[in-house]
Amino acid sequence: MPRDAGGSVFVVLGFVLVAAGVLFRGLVLRPFSAKRAEAAGIRERSRTLLCAADMAIAAARRRAASGEPAIVTVDDVTTTARQNYGYVVEREQAAAALRHAFKAAGDQSDCMTDAFD
């Protein structure tokens, strides 16, 4: 009775993949260099800070009464970053993020801020 070569190749390939997985497990999750890991952390922190600024602007707009401008302070951004993301942010960084959010949104005639002071 002839042996099926396709089945044997499939089984051997399976063993090779399992052995490779055992040998190289976790390497994908580890950063390849400390510099890239640090750069990724900085990018994530700045993205999160911009999200906190956007959230602070949205919260100020919800708090504002009809017809009056929303007042967003730098302290609102630091509070939002601390409460939602656990980041302790310096005032200068929060002001820069708030300025960036204002410029990115374009027309902000319904908002006022102390970030430009």
Image: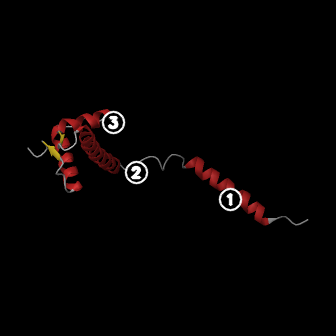
> What amino acid type is highlighted by mark number 3?
Asn
- Is the C terminus in the top left, top right, bottom left or bottom right quadrant? top left
Q: Disc 1 marks which residue?
A: 13
Q: Using the image as rendered, state which of residue 38 and residue 33 is in the foreground.
A: 38
Q: Disc 3 marks which residue?
A: 84
Q: Disc 2 marks which residue?
A: 32
x 72%, y 60%: residue: 10
Residue 35: image x %, image y %?
Answer: 31, 49
CB-based contact (under 8 Å), mark 3 and mark 2: no
Earlier sequence position, callout 1 versus callout 3: 1
x 78%, y 65%: residue: 5
Q: CA distance from mark 2 to mark 1?
A: 28 Å
Q: Is residue 17 left or right of residue 67?
A: right
Residue 47: image x %, image y %?
Answer: 30, 48
Mark 2, secondary structure of its residue: loop
> What amino acid type is highlighted by mark number 1?
Leu
Q: Of the numbered discs in the image, which one, if any, rests on residue 46?
A: none
